[in-house]
Amino acid sequence: MKSPTLITCGALAFSMLTSGVVFGEQLRIGELEYKTQCAVCHGTDGKGSGPYIEFLNKSPSDLTTLAQRHKGRFPFQHVYDVIDGSQSQTAHGPRDMPIWGSRYAMEIIEEYGPYTTDHPETVHARILSLVFYLGTIQE
């Protein structure tokens, strides 16, 4: 379960980031997460034109227009929830995008043993890094 405090801190940090305070390491990690986990479908530029597009039933979203599609504000919480799997997309049919929160948790299990409350912060940190990065590619 996500900690509301963690998400609030993440949103505050994102606000600071977009106001000019640069979290270089956070962005570098987020960009790496994007390139290794998302670009294959969403493209290296985030516009939805990754090399796997021909294998998908539904075209991936243009991630550079998330803020534009949400009245000019980057939907930090929504993006986090979609990535970690808690945001249901049932109105749009089956969920084709993988739930990365589960994938990250499995990596923790493989590295540290059964997933317990000892390491959920690693999952949250990786998702937050990715969300921060996505915020920086908005048009």
Image (cartoon, rainbow, N blue to C red):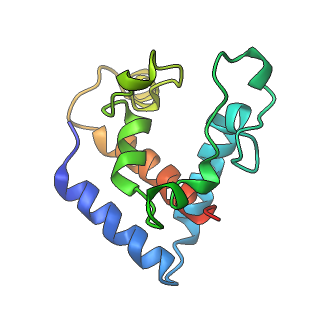
Q: Quadrant of residue 33?
A: top right
66 and 40: which one is in front?
66
Residue drawn at the location 44% of the way across and 26% of the way down: 99
Judged left or right of residue 32, residue 98 is left
Query: Where is the N terminus found, in terms of image quarters?
Result: top left
Judged left or right of residue 52, residue 75 is left
Residue drawn at the location 51% of the way across and 55% of the way down: 69
7 and 110: which one is in front?
7
Q: Quadrant of residue 88?
A: top left
Above or below, 8 relative to 53: below
All told, the count of numbered labels is 0
Query: Where is the C terminus found, in terms of image quarters?
Result: bottom right
Residue drawn at the location 62% of the way across and 60% of the way down: 28
How far from the left and from the top, in percent, is residue 10?
A: 34, 61
Outermost residue, bottom side: 20
Above or below, 68 relative to 80: below
Q: Quadrant of residue 138?
A: bottom right
Judged left or right of residue 121, residue 69 is right
Judged left or right of residue 41, residue 17 is left
Above or below, 13 relative to 91: below
Residue drawn at the location 25% of the way across and 56% of the way down: 6
How far from the left and from the top, in percent, is residue 62?
A: 64, 45
How far from the left and from the top, in percent, is residue 63?
A: 60, 48
Above or below, 66 relative to 56: below
